[in-house]
Image: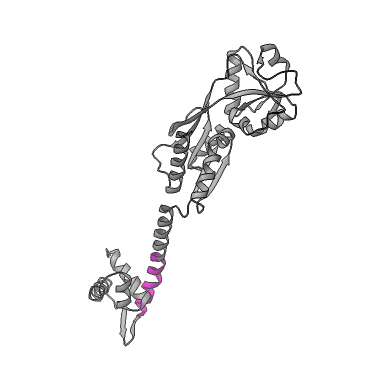
Amino acid sequence: MNISYDYYRVFYYVAKYKSFTGAAKALLNNQPNITRMMKKLEEELGCTLFVRQRHGIILTPEGEKLYAHISIAFEHILCGEEEIARDKSLQSGIVTVAASEIALHCVLLPVLKIFRKNFPGIRIRILNQSTPQAIDVLKKGLADFAIVTEPFDLPIGLGSQVLRSIREVPVCSTAFSLSTGTTLTEEQIKNYPLIGLGEQTASFRFYSDVFGRMGMSFTPDVEAATADQILPMIKSDLGIGFVPMDFLEKENRENLVILNMAPDIPARNICLLKRRGISLSIAASELEQRILYEVSIT
C-alpha cells in the first residue's frame, strides 16, 4: 500500500479526540475535509475504522488495531519534532569537546563560562586529554570537535583551524640560585632538574624539537601527567618547567622566577579540529561560533 502520511496523521487526531470536529480544530482544518480524508483512508484499507454515535465516534476493532500502531509511531514523530525545536532554540542538546590541557585553560574555559550562562539547558562534556588522544577521539566520532595544541599530525578526514598562538617561558621557584630575567645557558639547563610532560604528548614533541635545535635532548627529570600540574611542581621546588604566559597571568608570582632562553621558545598554535564533511549539531555549532568569536576579539 502507498497511503499518504497525511491520512494517517488525520486518523491519529480523529482517534485521539474521538471527534471529527476536534481533529479539525487541532489540525486547523475543516470538518468536511477531515471526513473526506477518513473515508478515503477506509477505502484504501478496505475496512471501517469509525462508528458514529450521538456524542462523537468510536473506533471499530480494525480502527483500534490501527491506532495502537499509529499512536506509537506518531508520538515518536512528535517527540522528535519537539526535540529538534528545543535544539533549534538552544534549550537543550549536548556538546562533546576533546581538549588538551593548555587548550582547555587558554581557550575553552573562558568561553564555556559565557556559553553556559547563555544556554543553561545545553549539556557539555569535556574530554580532557593529550593532543594525540583528543585527535584519536575525534577520528572515532566520540567528540563534536577538538581543541588542541600544536604540533600534531593531521589525519586524513580532519580539518584544522588556528584559533590563537601561545608563548611559554621557563619558570622555577626562588629555591634555585637563578633570578628573574636570567637567560638559561646550556650548562644551566643540564645542571638543573627539568619538569615536563610524557612522551605521548604534543608538548614533549614540541620541546624535543626546541632542545634538538640547541643540540640537546629533552629529558625531563620530573614527569607531569597534565600541563596544569607543572606549575604546582615548580612551586614545590622540583625544577624548571615550561609554562604558558596565560597560566602565569592568574598566579601570584612572588615565589616564582621567570627565566628566558636564547633563542626564545617559539610560539605555538592552539587549533580547532573537526571531521570533514560532517555537520555539527545546532548546539555544537553555536559553541564553535562562540569560540571563534571570542578568540577574534582577544
Q: Quadrant of the N terminus?
A: bottom left
Q: Classify residue 86 by image quadrant.
A: bottom left
Q: Is residue 152 above or below residue 112?
A: above
Q: Is residue 20 above or below residue 121?
A: below
Q: Is residue 168 above or below residue 129?
A: above
Q: Is residue 126 above or below residue 185?
A: below
> Which contiguous range is marked in magenta?
59-74
Q: What percent of the width, then of the height, locates residue 150?
A: 52, 27
Residue that appears at 33% across and 71% down: 26
Answer whether residue 63 is magenta in the image: yes
Answer whether residue 162 is magenta in the image: no
Residue lying furthest right: 175
Residue that appears at 58% across and 31% down: 246
Horizontally, is 20 left or right of 161 in the view? left
Any part of residue 226 in sight: no
Q: What percent of the width, then of the height, locates residue 28?
A: 29, 69
Residue that appears at 28% across and 68% down: 7
Horizontally, is 71 left or right of 213 in the view? left
Overall secondary structure of the magenta stretch?
Answer: helix
Q: Nearer the viewer, residue 44 or 183?
A: 183
Q: What percent of the width, then of the height, locates residue 33?
A: 23, 73
Q: Nearer the viewer, residue 175 or 66?
A: 175
Q: What percent of the width, then of the height, locates residue 183?
A: 65, 15
Q: Classify residue 71 by image quadrant.
A: bottom left
Any part of residue 88 in sight: yes
